Image: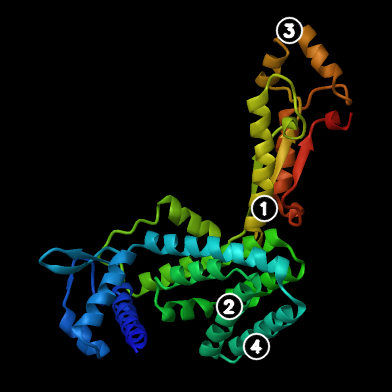
């Protein structure tokens, strides 16, 4: 009996926490305001004891602060707080998706495909509740397929920091329904842990942007100066499906090892890894990421390697299968091609511009 009473009181405290949390995030109560327990108790229909316990729960989450002899004070809730919450969810959800790619059964894959189809049907019918319901079921099925109970519990704990109705609006995004969920399903079918993790992470991070825009439209931060010219705001613009191309610069040292230039070689190898990882992360947003790997190009850097003498230049040229050094404009042309629509199906590629030097 005592256990039943404790369970019921815990449930009441969570109801209070959910109620007040939504008031804070919706902007109905503002940072700097003190909370009065009596109105909250009346609104939820509980006594003051569950109210206090629920407010202590919110204090542990950072939404409010207990000020001695004064009560509970609402603390600031910023766009960065939302990004941080969704970043945690993205990391945990991405790992669960990667594990699901290894362990998911054919029956679970079929169930996911059914959920995707039903969600699309709900979207076509304008059934917002159905869209949200099937979206939640899609993610829940992936978490079950991961067979990682404690990791799923950690994700659930992070999810609780935002009211359910905000997640419902996020799941109603048309882009998430028609594009992102089918891509995640395809990654799971291919048993691609890397693709499943990347797609799941980006799906969650883009949801953060959607929620921030929704709350800004409701005037949550209308009295605050929220700058959009911050690195986070720049990342938001990049995460939207605007498309584009990125071309990194490595060198032939990205492909081979040479004596005496350990740090240089390591950094150039890193460019290759960065390019391939970024290409996977950005693919669903229409952004291509490639790299050029120049060889011996006729630049001041090449002159320094040759000692700045005709003999040194001749020795360097003799190493080139084509019998000459490359021209800077040849590298530029390669960059222009990778950045152009002519290379629209090329991403994650490292293009060597080295006159055949690597083919020796």
Vertical placement of residue 47 versus 348, above or below:
below
Q: CA distance from mark 1 to mark 4?
A: 31 Å
Q: Nearer the viewer, mark 2 or mark 3?
A: 2
Q: CA distance from mark 3 to mark 1?
A: 41 Å
Mark 1 and mark 4 in contact? Answer it, CB < 8 Å.
Answer: no
N-terminal label among 2 and 1: 2
Q: CA distance from mark 2 to mark 1?
A: 28 Å
- Residue toward you, 38 or 173: 38
Q: Read off the residue under disc 4.
A: 118
Query: What is the tally of numbered marks visible in this picture?
Result: 4
In this figure, which colouring scheme has been used for the structure? rainbow
Q: Read off the residue under disc 1.
A: 279
Task: Say few, some or many: other residues with alpha carbon within 10 Å of mark 4 (under 14 / 14 to 19 / 20 or more).
Answer: some
Quadrant of the rendered image containing residue 261: top right
N-terminal label among 3 and 4: 4
Task: Say few, some or many: other residues with alpha carbon within 10 Å of mark 3 (under 14 / 14 to 19 / 20 or more).
Answer: few
Q: Read off the residue under disc 3.
A: 309
Q: Position of residue 17 (x, y in %)?
A: 31, 77
Residue sitting at x 63%, y 27%: 263
Residue sitting at x 74%, y 39%: 333
Q: Read off the residue under disc 2.
A: 140
N-terminal label among 3 and 1: 1
């Amino acid at each position: 009996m005592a256990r039943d009473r404790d369970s019921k009181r815990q449930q009441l405290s969570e109801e209070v926490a959910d109620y007040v949390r939504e008031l804070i995030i919706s902007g109905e109560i503002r940072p700097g305001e003190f909370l009065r327990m009596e109105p909250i108790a009346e609104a939820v229909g509980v006594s003051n004891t569950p109210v206090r316990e629920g407010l202590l729960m919110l204090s542990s989450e950072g939404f409010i602060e207990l000020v001695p002899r004064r009560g509970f004070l609402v603390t600031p809730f910023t766009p960065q707080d939302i990004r941080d919450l969704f970043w945690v969810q993205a990391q945990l959800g991405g790992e669960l998706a990667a594990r699901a790619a290894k362990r998911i059964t054919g029956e679970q894959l079929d169930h996911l495909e059914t959920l995707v189809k039903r969600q699309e049907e709900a979207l076509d019918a304008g059934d917002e509740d159905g869209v949200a319901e099937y979206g939640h079921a899609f993610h829940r099925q992936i978490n079950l397929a991961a067979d990682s109970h404690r990791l799923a519990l950690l994700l659930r704990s992070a999810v609780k920091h935002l009211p359910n109705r905000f997640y419902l609006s996020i799941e109603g995004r048309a882009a998430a329904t028609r594009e992102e969920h089918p891509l995640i399903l395809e990654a799971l079918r291919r048993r691609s842990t890397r693709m499943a993790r990347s797609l799941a992470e980006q799906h969650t991070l883009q949801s953060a942007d959607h929620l921030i825009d929704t709350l800004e439209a409701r005037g949550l931060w209308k009295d605050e100066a929220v700058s959009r010219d911050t690195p986070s705001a720049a990342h938001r613009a990049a995460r939207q499906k605007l498309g584009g191309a990125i071309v990194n610069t490595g060198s032939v040292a990205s492909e081979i090892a040479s004596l005496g230039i350990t740090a240089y070689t390591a950094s150039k190898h890193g460019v290759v890894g960065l390019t391939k990882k970024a290409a996977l992360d950005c693919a669903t947003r229409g952004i291509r990421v490639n790299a050029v790997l120049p060889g011996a190009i006729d630049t001041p850097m090449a002159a320094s390697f040759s000692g700045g003498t005709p003999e040194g230049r001749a020795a360097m040229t003799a190493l080139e299968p084509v019998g000459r050094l490359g021209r800077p404009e040849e590298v530029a042309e390669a960059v222009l091609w990778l950045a152009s629509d002519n290379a629209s199906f090329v991403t994650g590629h490292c293009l060597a511009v080295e006159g055949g030097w690597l083919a020796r």
